[in-house]
Amino acid sequence: ISIHLASFCEKIFNQLKIAYKREIIFHYDNDALTIMADELKLKQVIIITIDNALKYSTDRIDVYLEDHEHNAVIRVVDYGIGIPHNEIENIFERFYRVDKARSRATGGTGLGLSIAKNIMKQHHGEIKVKSTEGEGTEVELHLPKTQKTD
Ligand code: ATP
């Protein structure tokens, strides 16, 4: 099904802002970006990513919807604890959690990102993580844009 990303994201963020009582600031220029995706699965990936950003930070978070050459990109930026450089390659493994003691306080199973990665693969997309320990984390969801048929 074709999804209009700006309104789709806005709707999810409005629900999450109320549920978590936290600030999610949404930035976008292109109001017309659409992609083909399974709505429920895409919503699940977005929720997993935002849940992590909120869980591992205390400040507001920023989300950018970007129009790249081939992909629509949803970039989730937090200013939280970050992920140690040598752990980034592991976080997509099932049940993997960075620093068990630290993670225990926030709860969770360590399944979220492995599920997100699988869903992104099913959609011919990609999930990319950049992080600096003590500064914050950026997670990018890349999804192929709907082809123009003009
Ligand atoms: P659940 O999926 O049940 O919510 P989880 O958050 O522990 O549990 P994942 O979403 O798979 O599991 O994330 C794996 C690990 O990656 C987390 O335990 C955490 O250590 C680290 N991580 C993920 N996102 C962030 C983030 N935004 N900031 C800091 N660490 C993160």
Image (cartoon, grey):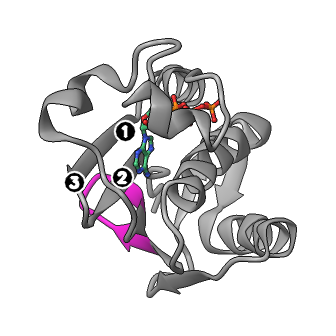
Q: Amino acid at mark 1?
A: Ile
Q: Quadrant of residue 91?
A: top left
Instruction: Give yes or no for residue 68 being in the magenta stretch.
Output: yes
| Relative height, residue 138 to residue 86 (above, below) | below
Residue at 67% x, 49% y: name it.
47
Q: Which residue is mark 2?
A: 140
Rendered location of residue 101, percent (x, y): 48, 31
Rendered location of residue 61, percent (x, y): 50, 75
The residue closer to the viewer here, 62 or 132, is: 132
Q: Amino acid at mark 3?
A: Glu
Q: Which residue is mark 3?
A: 133
Label 2 C-beta lies within 8 Å of the nearest ligand 1 atom = no
Rendered location of residue 10, percent (x, y): 70, 75
Q: Which residue is mark 1?
A: 127
Label 1 C-beta lies within 8 Å of the nearest ligand 1 atom = no
Farthest residue, direction top: 94
For marks 3 and 1, give the one nearer the viewer.
3
Do labels 2 and 1 touch, CB within 8 Å?
yes
Badge 2 density bin: few <14, some 14–19, many ≥20, Cα 10 Å = many
Earlier sequence position, callout 2 versus callout 1: 1
Q: Which residues are magenta?
A: 64-75
Residue at 71% x, 35% y: name it.
38
Give the CA distance from mark 3 to mark 1: 19 Å
Q: Secondary structure at mark 1?
A: strand
The residue closer to the viewer here, 33 or 39, is: 39
